Image: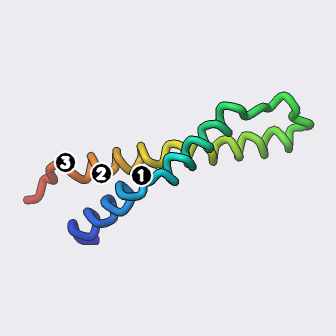
Amino acid sequence: MSQQDEEKYFEAYFDTFLLDGWKQFIGEINELIDNYDISDVKDDIDLYIKQGELRVLRRVSAFETGIRNAYDHFLEPKDVP
């Protein structure tokens, strides 16, 4: 991927992150995470399922931060001989 293509890649995400729908979506994801209750776990299989669900929710919640960190890394000067 060329540098210009990578720049467009990040810009598309940054445009998305400005949308009210994105903010609403992430707000709901964070609310789900905050209200996640494992007190009704029935058995070890149910626990593993809930752990997986929570892991996915946290990954989605952190997606914007990950993209911004990747962009910061992209902007760092590259050592080109």
Q: In this view, does 35 lie above or below 53?
A: above
Q: What residue is rendered at 43% in x and 47% in y?
A: 64
* Extreme-right residue of the structure: 42
Dot 2 crowding, Cα within 10 Å, few <14, some 14–19, many 20+: some
The answer to which image quadrant residue 80 occupies is bottom left
Could you say where residue 67 lies in the image, as x and y percent from the top left? 39, 50
Spatial distance from mark 3 to mark 2, Cα to Cα?
A: 9 Å
Spatial distance from mark 3 to mark 1, Cα to Cα?
A: 22 Å
Q: Earlier in the sequence, mark 1 or mark 2?
A: 1
Q: What residue is rendered at 41% in x and 43% in y?
A: 65
Name the disc covering residue 71, or none.
2
Q: In this view, does 7 lie above or below 1?
A: above
Q: What residue is rendered at 25% in x and 53% in y?
A: 74
Q: Is mark 1 on a helix, strand or loop?
A: helix
Spatial distance from mark 1 to mark 2, Cα to Cα?
A: 14 Å
Q: Of tags 1 and 2, which is closer to the observer?
A: 1
Name the disc covering residue 76, or none.
3
Q: Which of marks 3 and 1 is nearer the N terminus?
A: 1
